[in-house]
Image (cartoon, helix red, strand yellow):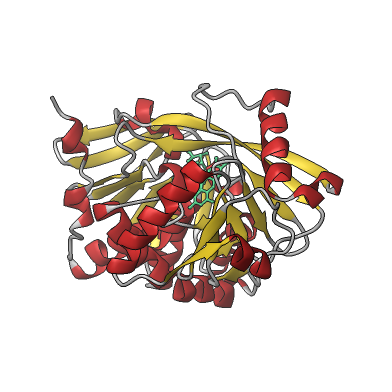
Amino acid sequence: MNILIVGSGIVGLSTAFELALAGKKVTVVTRNYEEGASWVAGGMLAPLSEGLEGELLEFSLENLRLYPDYVSRIEEVSKIKVFFEKEGILRLGVDEEEMELIRKRAEVYSRMGLKVETLEKGDLRNIEPAISEKVEGGVLHHEEGNVDAEKLMDALLIGVGNLGVRIVVDEVVEVERRNSRVESVKGLKDRYSADFFVFATGSWSKSLLKLPVFPVKGQILKVKGPEPKKVCYSKASYIIPKEGFLLIGATSEEAGFDTRNNLKGVGTLIDGAVRVMPSLGEAELIDVKVGFRPATPDGKPVFEAGENFATLTGHHRNGILWAPISAKMVLDLIEKGVRSRYFDLFSPSRFEG
Ligand SMILES: Cc1cc2nc3c(=O)[nH]c(=O)nc-3n(C[C@H](O)[C@H](O)[C@H](O)COP(=O)(O)OP(=O)(O)OC[C@H]3O[C@@H](n4cnc5c(N)ncnc54)[C@H](O)[C@@H]3O)c2cc1C
């Protein structure tokens, strides 16, 4: 069976990886394999810190459970070690209002059986002594994790190469579709046919797939300096320790596809980080990266399964977290004929009318 995947972000490459590992012949067509939100992402696996609820939370927790195996499969095939830890994220309350909000959420999560620990000022500084005295407290979400998204993307690219996936650089400009069947896709350089098509075009899905997906720009800083032991997530900033560097994120701007950074965004991120962890004032700024989150009007992803195609887009703020199940849904559909219920829960039909 020949499978053609459009898009080489984490969603397209994870799908290519799982299908190729299962013995399928896969081609990825991408405009630019270094483009995409996936190379820029903070890599937090943080549905509780994000305050997700209902079906999005359920979907996220299922992804979290699959993450260790997903990463080890990719490491094994690529022979690249990916920084990944699942030791919890500190959700901070920088003022009383935020503390109140996270305390209430922690009660709900705790009633659901999730491992959450509310920390008053003193307890918090026992865990992270570098946190400012002004931070009110926090909640430790034990189940959450942190992955180096850039390293994971490197490993996926090498991994799919090792599995024989062909990567073609071309921009797809038209999907020739008859009802729920895709006949072929037309690129600027060639026309492509396949037995099954997967569309994973992130923020650029609107014009190609006629879906209400729009870009939310994010600027994020790469920094060298004092590192907290855990990810420190608050409304002021996210401070994300990796291996030998930190990420400080992230702005959220509706500014189209403007790839430039700006001092306003960078300044806000620096102020927010130093407010939470004053010693970061001495840190060295290494890079400012910009990416586009594929957002939807209701903040939920868009999954569609047709006769011979699947669409996986709209991953917005959580695409790194949601990659394992996105890929598995396509694998299960093709291998076992099993249609995941997430195709119905997150169907694009919700936007009709
Ligand atoms: C600053 C920032 C911080 C983030 N932090 C986190 C985080 O901490 N945790 C988390 O889980 N998520 C995070 N995200 C969100 C996450 O990065 C995205 O949800 C995810 O990367 C989306 O992956 P994707 O594969 O759908 O899209 P992308 O990675 O954007 O890839 C889309 C691909 O499609 C290709 N393409 C598009 N159109 C065409 C076409 N017509 N023809 C051919 N190819 C095409 C592009 O070239 C690209 O390769 C963050 C995002 C940003 C911007």
Residue 312: % across, % down: 34, 47
Q: From the viewer's perspective, is 248 left or right of 251?
A: right
Front residue of 300 and 205: 300
Residue 133: % across, % down: 69, 53
Image quadrant where one finds the C terminus:
top left
Where residue 294 sits, quadrant-wise, is top left
Residue 270: % across, % down: 73, 38
Front residue of 346 and 304: 346
Image quadrant where one finds the N terminus:
bottom left
Residue 256 visible in this rendered orientation of the protein: yes
Q: Vertical placement of 256 versus 271: above or below?
A: above
- Residue depicted at 37% across the width and 41% down the height: 314
Where residue 151 sits, quadrant-wise, is bottom right
- Residue depicted at 73% across the width and 25% down the height: 263
Residue 42: % across, % down: 59, 50
Front residue of 198 and 97: 97
Q: Vertical placement of 335 versus 343: above or below?
A: below
Q: Vertical placement of 36 versus 225: above or below?
A: above
Q: From the viewer's perspective, is 70 left or right of 181?
A: right
Q: From the viewer's perspective, is 258 left or right of 116?
A: right
Front residue of 311 and 134: 134
Residue 43 visible in this rendered orientation of the protein: no
